[in-house]
Image (spheres, rainbow, N blue to C red):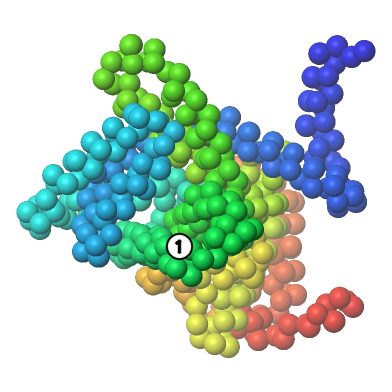
Amino acid sequence: MHSPAGYYTQIKRFLLNELWRTDVESLGWLQRYAYKLIRLLFVLVREFANGQLNLRAMSLVYTTLLSMVPLLAVSFSVLKAFGVHNQIEPLLLGLVEPLGEKGDEIVFNILGFVENMKVGVLGSVGLALLLYTVISLIQKVEVSFNYVWHTKSSRSLSRRFSDYLSVIMVGPVLVFSAIGLTASMMRSEVVQTIVSIEPFGSLVVFVSKLVPFFLVILAFSFVYVFVPNTKVKFSSALVGAVVGGALWQTSGLVFAEFASSSTKYAAIYSGFAILIMFMIWLYLSWLVLLLGAQVAYYHQYPEQIRLSSQRVPLSGRFREQMGLLIMYWITNRFVHEGKPLSLESLTQKLYMPGDRVGETLQLLQERGLLLESGSEPPTYLLAHDPANLTVAELMEIMRQPDDEQVVMENRLISVPQVDALMQEVERGIREHLDGMTLRELALQPLPDAGEKAGG
């Protein structure tokens, strides 16, 4: 019999060696999906243990507490104009249902604050501050999601106001209107007649119990598609939403049991116990939302599921190849159609993660080869006439050292023989390219699929 230490050694060896060295595509479908699932769980646990998701979830709790009343005040004002403001309370009660009676008390207090806040008497400055507080909440959420999706740039200030306010103003109206329309349809005579007939009645009851879960999945999917400042496939967002929704429902059941048996916390913290429980529930909710986003990211980029959490360093040749490909496609589009390409378009053409393409785009901008437009989303333009820029010059510019590398090169003790060899290599590249310009490279026809496969 194996000792516990022996089992631990076997499990560790499997997780750190066999799990990643096995060619999963050669396995049967059941083993293949089992290996992929274990790999995904491994990287999710690693991301959780890294602590960044915890820190971001905790920061969002603080931001939520500050921005909750202003956010509800803006939504309440919009919904009141459409006559559906009374549906806010049932929705909030459903969100804090795991808190039990304490959750009801929190909702009533928050709604009391919202009703006492007179948006109409705030004035222009007060209204601007109110909207800024609401937008800052969504901006903090976007920053957290951009971290999950390895996106360095956030939305511009103009896009924050246009995108965020459109969701804040229009989103609640559409959601509550759909809920109200569904409720009125369920009360209609035709539906009631169908419900009275079995097995349709039992089926409707069963589906009605699943409606909250479907609504959570729909809400999570919308957040995963809209909030990150990058292109998220709906299929990946849906997978992340299903996982996140299941985790949210499960954590709600577990937290409800915890809250119901936490009378000792009321004895210790007195009136603050309700606030502490509410903050814990907010933290769990944000953490689940971020974990679902992490699942969506790995579903869209399965190549990022790997043993090491460190980013794979790009070799000099591969970085140079990516730079040439980006310059080729931007020039190709400029020559044939005259329309610039965005980060999303380049990501699709190169079939590479957006953060890697973004790094190369930033390098090309720093070297003065590309310019970023002011449109939304930003597109990329050639900084030089492609008919006057040779490919050899382009490669030399990309190979130029940055400031830190220049300092290191100046300290490097060179050898004449090595310097002569490097010069011969560069001269050979220039002679082989024979003055080919970037425009000439872009005008060369691409081989079709048959020629590429045959070659």
Query: Viewed as shown, does residue 50 lie left or right of 154?
Result: right
Query: Viewed as shown, does residue 441 lie left or right of 16?
Result: left
Q: Position of residue 13 (x, y in %)?
A: 82, 27
415 shown above or below 392: above
| Residue sitting farthest toward the right | 1
Query: Viewed as shown, does residue 224 lie left or right of 119?
Result: right
Identified at 90% across, 78% down, the residue is 454
Q: Position of residue 144 (x, y in %)?
A: 45, 45
Quarter of the image with the N terminus in it: top right
Residue 431 visible? The answer is yes
Quarter of the image with the C terminus in it: bottom right
For label 1, the crowd category at 10 Å Cα-Cα, with few meaning under 14, some 14 to 19 and many 20 or more, is: some
421 shown above or below 9: below
Q: Quadrant of residue 440?
A: bottom right
Query: Viewed as shown, does residue 398 lie left or right of 92?
Result: right
Q: Position of residue 247 (x, y in %)?
A: 57, 39
Identified at 17% across, 46% down, the residue is 115
Q: Position of residue 241 (x, y in %)?
A: 56, 51
259 shown above or below 390: above
For the residue pair 264 and 281, the one nearer the viewer reads as 264
Q: Amino acid at mark 1?
A: Met
SS for callout 1: helix
Residue 157 visible? The answer is no
Tell me the residue that label 1 is attached to.
Answer: 186
Identified at 40% across, 31% down, the residue is 99
Number of numbered labels in the structure image: 1
Q: Quadrant of residue 330?
A: bottom right
Identified at 68% across, 38% down, the residue is 41
For the residue pair 128 and 307, the one nearer the viewer reads as 128
For the residue pair 427 and 276, the one nearer the viewer reads as 276
